[in-house]
Image: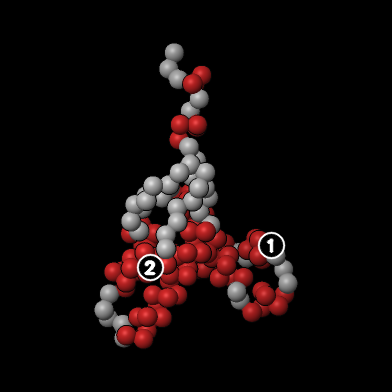
Amino acid sequence: MRFTEHELTAALTGAAKTVVASNRKVRKGGKDIDTVWNEMDRHQRFKVLDALGTQILPVLVALPDVEVEPGTRPSYTNSQVAETITGLVGDELGKLRRAAVIKARTLLVQTALANVPPRLDPDALISASDGPS
């Protein structure tokens, strides 16, 4: 799938915020995840994004091309995502560990896809008055 840099950034950031929000201390603190994310220093955010990026980005890039209507997000079934992940994971893991990795990454990728902003209509970005004179 061809995602823009902005879409990939939004997807990865959304997944990272979800992972940070699942931390017990954050859940018990009762703070809004955006507040917690903004209070993290750049290095802390980098560590989270880097760890998730190696798991999510290769899958997003390897997903099959789908037609995305303007105003909607790309969507994939869990089986499509799991199939893509299966091809990327390889056979070096044991059967049980491989199944756990596939299931966890499928959830992470679906979370990332839910945070991709809706596609814009490329024709609407250029108005007729802005054309060549």
Type of amino acid under label 2: Ser
Quadrant of res 55: bottom left
Question: Residue extending furthest left?
Answer: 91
The reply to whether residue 54 is in sight is no
Q: Is residue 68 left or right of residue 20?
A: left
Residue 42: % across, % down: 57, 62
Question: Residue extending furthest top?
Answer: 133
Q: In the drawing, what numbered circle is on residue 35?
A: 1
| Between discs 2 and 1, the one toward the N terminus | 1
Q: Nearer the viewer, mark 2 or mark 1?
A: 2
Give the secondary structure at mark 1: helix
Marks 2 and 1 in Cβ contact (< 8 Å): no
Give the secondary structure at mark 2: helix
Quadrant of res 77: bottom left
User: 131 and 83: which one is in front?
Assistant: 83
Residue sitting at x 49%, y 45%? 119
Mark 2 Cα within 10 Å, few/some/many (few <14, many 20+)?
Answer: few
Type of amino acid under label 1: Thr
User: 49 and 60: which one is in front?
Assistant: 60
Residue 114: % across, % down: 52, 59
Query: Eyeballing the image, is 105 above or below 13?
Result: below
Residue labelled with disc 2: 79
Residue sitting at x 66%, y 61%? 34
Residue 29: % across, % down: 72, 75
Q: In the drawing, what numbered circle is on residue 131?
A: none
The reply to whether residue 70 is in sight is yes
Mark 1 Cα within 10 Å, few/some/many (few <14, many 20+)?
Answer: few
Q: Is residue 26 left or right of residue 53?
A: right
